[in-house]
Image (cartoon, helix red, strand yellow):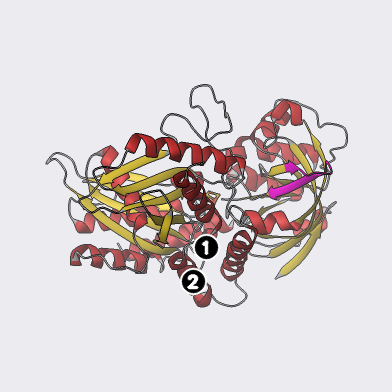
């Protein structure tokens, strides 16, 4: 087996079984602020226990191991066809090893061949850069939380949302309200303002690659992120929608240019089982370091 | 308040439970999801050995493997989204005498009304907590309709110990989901 394939299998294992530190810290913060004896507190305690168990047993944190999203930053010379082939083989092998559930269904026949491979699965996003370094990030995005994502076209009369940041704020908070009780909160929002219907959702998912504790370099978006996080946590929705203070763990917002006629706000929701990891790779495919 | 529950459960015991109560479930639990609900609602009969009278039904498509000794072993067993069974749940509850339904995300008015009329509760498990919940399943007693429905959709009979859940719909017409939805809507309106 190639070095690269081995590395990618290890990346999948780690992503599926170990929650990243920034997410775990945010969950612990939520746990501290919930009142003793509430169902919100005990929900977070169970979540915390689950995170520990999954890690020690090297088993999936959640049984829905989600859509498999690879993001690769690479130099111009990297053979993307070969990389893609190795990534698919790694997915197949990781499924056999139980790091991934047999989770990919042919949309027309309804058949699940148990490999997690097929059109669009896994999805691979390559990005060439001028540096000589290669890195690969992986996000496993569960179905329950994917189902509560929402895309709004502004202006939205019902929500009194205009084509400005205040309008964005209104629709994003609406998405949080609608997602309650579904999608396994506390969650994290990835948002894209602008783009078209496809790129909007795609960019919104890229926001999940950011560290939860980072700050948006754009002061306006930073303010919006902080505002939505604070406001959402004042709504009393809480973990699992049981009530409580921990509704969201983070909000990440980016922007893409749009055509004058369109103004989309695309909101992706990530459940508490936020599985994301990444590694830097040597030329032979060996892992040289972890990114999260 | 934390209650212990084990099947068969009497109507009286169920009527004592209120929205927001935490429960630890022990004893027998049967799984059933989309295929089972549709089958029963279409007039299908329960296979021999499955008795839901006073029992608990779990909306779950577990990952179950056979170990080297040929014993079934549950490796992941979190709840699946319950609302898909809304068209069927109320009738099935009444017809088979079910007292508790475990799932996630809550259910709607038809089920809530059935809970009130018949004397049953909806028990919300922690979504995604596959490992913790799998540990609470101490034995797989049996599996039914495996050939017809396939593993995730089959009826699994589990013996559970201290399986944690929260009453989010009770037999008095109360729903935590409705309540929190309304309250958070008001809170949002003030912050718009
Ligand atoms: S929404 Fe997330 S935590 Fe919930 S079942 Fe799906 S993947 Fe698991």
Q: Chain of mark 2?
A: A
Please name whichever residue, B91 or A48, is drawn nearer the observer in this view of the structure. A48
Percent x, y for residue A20?
Answer: 47, 63
Numbered label attached to residue A30: 2
Element type at mark 2 = helix
Residue A246, visible in the rendered structure? no
Q: Chain of mark 1?
A: A
Q: Residues within 10 Å of mark 2 (few under 14, many from 20)?
A: many
Q: Is residue B172 left or right of residue A245?
A: right
User: Residue farthest to the left?
Assistant: A260
User: Residue farthest to the right?
Assistant: B49
Q: Residue at x 28, y 57 (%)?
A: A253
Do the residues bearing badges 1 and 2 touch, measured as CB atoms within 8 Å?
yes
Reply yes or no: does residue A181 show up in magenta: no
Numbered label attached to residue A276: none
Residue B57, visible in the rendered structure? yes
Please name whichever residue, A233 or B77, is drawn nearer the observer in this view of the structure. B77
Q: Which residue is mark 1?
A: A239
Q: Is residue B37 left or right of residue A282?
A: right
Would you place residue B103 above or below residue A248 in this image? above
Percent x, y for residue A290?
Answer: 42, 61
What is the magenta range? B65-75
Q: Residues within 10 Å of mark 1 (few under 14, many from 20)?
A: many
User: Residue farthest to the front?
Assistant: A284
């Amino acid at each position: 087996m190639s070095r690269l394939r081995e590395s990618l299998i290890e990346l999948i294992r780690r992503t599926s079984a170990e929650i990243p530190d920034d997410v775990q810290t945010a969950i612990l913060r939520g746990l501290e602020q919930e009142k003793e004896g509430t169902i919100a507190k005990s929900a977070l305690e169970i979540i915390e226990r689950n995170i520990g168990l999954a890690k020690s047993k090297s088993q999936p944190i959640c049984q829905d191991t989600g859509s498999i999203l690879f993001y690769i930053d690479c130099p111009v010379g990297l053979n993307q066809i070969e990389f893609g082939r190795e990534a698919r083989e790694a997915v197949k092998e990781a499924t056999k090893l139980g790091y991934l559930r047999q989770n990919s269904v042919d949309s027309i026949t309804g058949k699940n061949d148990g490999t997690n491979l097929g059109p669009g699965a896994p999805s691979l996003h390559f990005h060439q850069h001028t540096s000589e370094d290669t890195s690969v990030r992986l996000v496993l995005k569960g179905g329950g939380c994917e189902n509560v994502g929402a895309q709004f076209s502004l202006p939205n009369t019902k929500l009194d949302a205009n084509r400005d940041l205040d309008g964005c704020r209104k629709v994003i908070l609406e998405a949080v309200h609608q997602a309650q009780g579904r999608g396994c909160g506390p969650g994290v929002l990835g948002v894209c303002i602008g783009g078209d219907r496809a790129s909007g959702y795609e960019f919104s998912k890229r926001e999940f690659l950011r560290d939860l504790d980072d700050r948006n370099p754009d002061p306006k978006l930073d303010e919006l992120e902080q505002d939505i996080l604070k406001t959402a946590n004042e709504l009393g929705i809480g973990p699992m929608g049981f009530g409580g203070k921990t509704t969201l763990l983070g909000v990440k917002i980016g922007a893409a240019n749009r055509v004058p006629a369109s103004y989309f706000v695309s909101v992706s929701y990530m459940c508490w089982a936020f599985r994301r990891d990444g590694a830097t790779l040597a030329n032979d495919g060996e892992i040289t370091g972890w990114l999260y | 308040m934390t209650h212990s529950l084990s099947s068969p459960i009497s109507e009286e015991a169920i009527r004592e439970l209120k929205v927001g109560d935490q429960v630890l479930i022990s004893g027998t639990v049967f799984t059933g999801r989309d295929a089972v609900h549709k089958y029963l609602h279409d007039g299908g009969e329960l296979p021999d050995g499955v008795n839901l009278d006073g029992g608990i039904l779990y909306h779950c498509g577990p990952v179950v493997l056979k170990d080297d000794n040929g014993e079934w072993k549950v490796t992941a067993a979190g709840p699946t989204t319950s609302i898909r069974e809304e068209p069927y749940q109320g009738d099935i509850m009444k017809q088979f005498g079910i007292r508790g339904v475990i799932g996630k995300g809550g259910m709607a008015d038809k089920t809530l009304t059935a809970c009130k009329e018949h004397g049953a509760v909806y028990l919300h498990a922690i979504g995604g907590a596959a490992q913790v919940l799998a540990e609470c399943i101490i034995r797989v007693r049996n599996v039914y309709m495996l050939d017809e429905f396939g593993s995730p959709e089959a009826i699994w009979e589990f013996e559970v110990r201290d399986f944690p859940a929260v009453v989010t719909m009770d037999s008095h017409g109360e729903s935590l989901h409705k309540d929190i939805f309304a309250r958070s809507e008001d809170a949002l309106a003030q912050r718009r």
